[in-house]
């Protein structure tokens, strides 16, 4: 795999295992499992982030409540639910590492292309928000489609980005619960995942993972 296709999508997470491993799929004889990782925010709240891990990296010590630090990539795939295609997101684990208290527990760096017109809005309290979908190239002519959200001056920058524009960004992966009403009137609580942008530019800005997570 080309180095640039590893360096354009880099994630570091440290948290607590919040679910038992659940079989996901098998590829070339290698089994992969899904685990929820509970990652602390600076606000003392938590994000619960799905990760996908090979059976070659799983150990008996990885139980619910165990601390885990990983490096990987934020990936997307399509899943058919109720005869509709749904975009699913997960952190694909490439390596398990040791953690120390100087590390930021949730960092993502991606380099990709705007693939959908940004959606800009303001809250009732006049806070500026902008959503944008970024396509990140992966090996074997695949791409990951990652929803991102920007705030304040970053939102003002993002709202003017044109489709096809290449950008670099640094942020964190966050989970967010929302409610959806079904055709039968039932209210379901679901979870969305997105990249909360801290820095975004068309110039090189990747330095946090190099300094703090040694990716």
Image: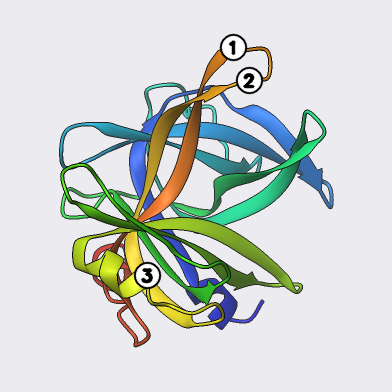
Determine which quarter of the picture holds residue 35. Answer: top right
Say which residue label 2 marks: 182
> Which dot marks residue 5?
none
Mark 1 or mark 3: name the one nearer the start of the chain: 3
Q: Secondary structure at mark 1?
A: loop
Q: Is residue 207 left or right of residue 92?
A: left
Q: Residues within 10 Å of mark 1 (few under 14, many from 20)?
A: few
Q: Nearer the viewer, residue 156 or 74?
A: 156
Q: Is residue 17 above or below residue 184?
A: below
The percent coordinates of residue 8 (x first, y second) are 50, 74
Q: Nearer the viewer, residue 160 or 60?
A: 160
Q: Are marks 3 and 2 in contact (CB under 8 Å)?
A: no
Residue 52 visible in the shown view: yes
Q: Are marks 1 and 2 in contact (CB under 8 Å)?
A: yes
Residue 57 visible in the shown view: no
The percent coordinates of residue 52 (x first, y second) are 59, 43
How many angstroms separate mark 1 from mark 3 (CA)?
A: 34 Å
> Which dot marks residue 186?
1
Please report the residue visible at 58 percent of the width from the left and 55 percent of the height from the top: 75
Q: Is residue 74 above or below residue 154?
A: above
Please report the residue visible at 58 percent of the width from the left and 76 percent of the height from the top: 5
Q: Is residue 119 left or right of residue 121?
A: right
Please report the residue visible at 47 percent of the width from the left and 28 percent of the height from the top: 61
Determine which quarter of the picture holds residue 21. Answer: top right
Q: Secondary structure at mark 2?
A: loop
> Which dot marks residue 159?
3
How many angstroms separate mark 1 from mark 2 (CA)?
A: 5 Å
């Amino acid at each position: 795999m080309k180095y640039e296709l590893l360096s354009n999508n880099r994630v570091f997470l440290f948290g607590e295992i919040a679910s038992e491993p659940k079989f996901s799929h098998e590829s070339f004889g290698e089994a992969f499992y899904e685990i929820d990782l509970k990652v602390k925010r600076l606000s003392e709240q938590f994000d619960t982030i799905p990760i996908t891990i090979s059976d070659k990296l799983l150990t008996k010590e990885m139980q619910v409540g165990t601390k885990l630090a990983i490096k990987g990539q934020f990936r997307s795939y399509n899943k058919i639910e109720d005869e509709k295609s749904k975009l699913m997101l997960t952190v694909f684990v490439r390596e398990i590492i040791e953690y120390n208290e100087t590390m930021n527990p949730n960092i993502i760096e991606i380099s990709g292309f705007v693939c959908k017109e940004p959606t800009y809005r303001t809250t009732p309290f006049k806070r500026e928000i902008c959503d944008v979908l970024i396509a990140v190239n992966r090996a074997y002519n695949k791409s990951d489609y990652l929803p991102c959200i920007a705030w304040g001056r970053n939102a003002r920058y993002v709202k003017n980005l044109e489709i096809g524009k290449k950008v670099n960004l640094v942020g964190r992966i966050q989970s967010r619960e929302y409610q959806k009403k079904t055709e039968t009137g039932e209210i379901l609580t679901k979870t969305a995942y997105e990249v909360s942008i801290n820095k975004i530019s068309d110039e090189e800005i990747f330095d946090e993972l190099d300094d703090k997570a040694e990716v």
